Amino acid sequence: KAGVTQTPRYLIKTRGQQVTLSCSPISGHRSVSWYQQTPGQGLQFLFEYFSETQRNKGNFPGRFSGRQFSNSRSEMNVSTLELGDSALYLCASSQPGLEYTGELFFGEGSRLTVL
Amino acid sequence: KQEVTQIPAALSVPEGENLVLNCSFTDSAIYNLQWFRQDPGKGLTSLLLIQSSQREQTSGRLNASLDKSSGRSTLYIAASQPGDSATYLCAVRPRETSGSRLTFGEGTQLTVNP
C-alpha cells in the first residue's frame, strides 16, 4: 500500500511568486492535513481538509490556502511568496473513522526555498 | 493553549546504551500522543501512538509511556544502534481542537556513536 505522496519534493521560487504543492493521501484516507516545518518555529499546523471541506485552520495569513478534491488528493497554495516561507511542507493523512484518535501518517515533504 | 516541550534538545550516546527521551505537555485534555522519528531532510515516521486511556505502548526496542495527569511522556530506546540516530518528535492531539491537528514539541536530536 503506497504511503502519502507529495510533489514536488524540491522547488525554488523567488519572492512575489506563487507555488502549488500537491499531496496524495494513503488510499482510502479522507482526511489530509498540512504542516510547515522551519528551524525557528518547528512544526506548525496549517490546515486540515476532510471530504473536500476545510475543517481546521492554523494561524497563518490568507496567502496560504488549500483545497481537497473528490479523490481526497489535496493541494496547498502560497501566493506572494516571502523569504520566510522557505520551509519543509509536510502533508499527513489519517484512517477513515479515526480522524480524531488514529495514527497520523506523513509524507516526505516538499522543500520550498524562496530567494 | 497547549504547549509541548522536549528535553533534552540533543543527546549523544555510545552504541548499546539504553536511553530515555522526555516530552511534557501543559494541558492534560488530549485524545492521544504520538512519537515520530525524522531523518535529516525527510518526512516524519510514526513510531508509537498512545491513546489517552493507555499507560504505555511497545514496538520492538521502543517503549513509550504516558502519564496524562502529570502531562508527561517518555520514549525508552533499548540497546541503541547507530541507525537510531535521528530527531525524535512527540506530538499531542488536544481535545480543544477537532480532527487531525497536532501540537508538536521541538524534538530531541539523537546521535548514537559506533
Image: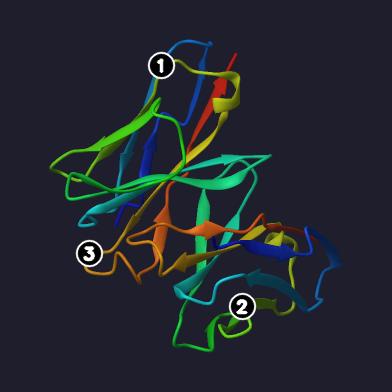
Q: CA distance from mark 1 to mark 3?
A: 32 Å
User: Where does residue B18 sit, x and y in percent of width and height?
Assistant: 78, 79
Quadrant where the image shows the N terminus of chain A: bottom left
Q: Amino acid at mark 2?
A: Gly
Residue wearing tag 2:
B71
Q: Which mark is residue A18?
A: 1
Q: Residues within 10 Å of mark 2 (few under 14, many from 20)?
A: some
Residues at discs 3 and 2 both on one chain: no
Q: Position of residue B34 (x, y in %)?
A: 51, 68
Instruction: Report whether A60 appears left or right of A83.
Output: left
Helix, strand or loop for disc 3: loop
Considering only vertical position in the picture, is B46 above or below A109?
Answer: below
Residue highlighted by disc 3: A96
Looking at the rendered structure, the number of numbered marks drawn on it comes to 3
The quadrant holding residue A102 is bottom left
The alpha-carbon separation of the residues under discs 3 and 2 comes to 28 Å
Give the colouring mode of the picture: rainbow
Give the x, y percent position of residue B26: 61, 70
Amino acid under disc 1: Gln
Mark 3 chain: A
Q: Looking at the picture, which amino acid does disc 3 mark?
A: Pro
